[in-house]
Amino acid sequence: MDTSSFVVVSTDVLPDIFPKVLEVKRMLACGEEKSSASACKKVGISRSAFYKYRECVFAYEEKLTQKLVSYYALLKDEPGVLSSILSEFHKQGANIITVNQNMPIDGAAAVNITVRLFGDASGAYELKNILSSMDGVVDVKFISGE
């Protein structure tokens, strides 16, 4: 039986190892370092310490403050429609995670777009309304959101 739980703790009161593990994870994810050995050496921890804690330590932003929202859109098969949709996501501060577009049928193509939003839930609905009113957009629906 798994009895683990999560807590939010300021890094000011944690041993130095935990922020260093987070820094190694960030460096590897961003491609700043190619191997865990070089990243660990750069921040000053052992690889064994990194491997011991890497699956247990997460930055607060990664787990609790962002939400993923998936949209389904039916777009006219016209040049620039998908590009304008993606530009609007960028303009609204959304981070695009995935874009899956189907082949156009009868002049329209289905697109699934998953984005990471920052802020309150109303932003997801406002963004849906903005997208729905754009030229070339036939329909926009939520698929899912967390």
Image (spheres, rainbow, N blue to C red):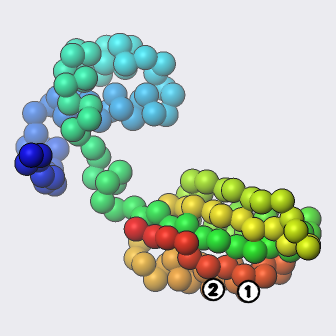
Quadrant of residue 21 within the rendered picture: top left
Q: Is residue 101 visible?
A: yes
Task: Give amino acid for label 1.
Answer: Ser
Q: Residue at x 34, y 62 (%)?
A: 65
Point out which mark residue 129 bears.
Answer: 2
> Which one is nearer the viewer's eye here, 127 or 109?
109
Quadrant of residue 12 within the rendered picture: top left
> Which one is nearer the viewer's eye here, 138 or 83?
138
Q: Residues within 10 Å of mark 2 (few under 14, many from 20)?
A: few
Residue on which disc 1 sits: 133
Task: Give amino acid for label 2.
Answer: Asn
| Circles 2 and 1: CB atoms closer than 8 Å | yes
Query: In the picture provided, is 96 more to the left or to the right than 118?
Result: right
Task: Please tell me whether residue 50 is drawn above or below residue 58 in the rendered image.
Answer: above
| Residue 84 on image: x %, y % | 78, 68
| Residue 98 on image: x %, y % | 61, 54
| Residue 76 on image: x %, y % | 86, 74
Point out which mark residue 22 bears.
Answer: none
| Residue 89 on image: x %, y % | 64, 67
Q: Secondary structure at mark 2?
A: helix
Query: In the picture provided, is 143 more to the left or to the right than 84?
Result: left
Q: Is residue 91 visible?
A: no
Q: Residue at x 26, y 31 (%)?
A: 54
Q: Secondary structure at mark 1?
A: loop
Q: Residue at x 39, y 35 (%)?
A: 26
Q: CA distance from mark 2 to mark 1?
A: 6 Å
Task: Please tell me whether residue 11 is drawn above or below residue 114 in the rendered image.
Answer: above
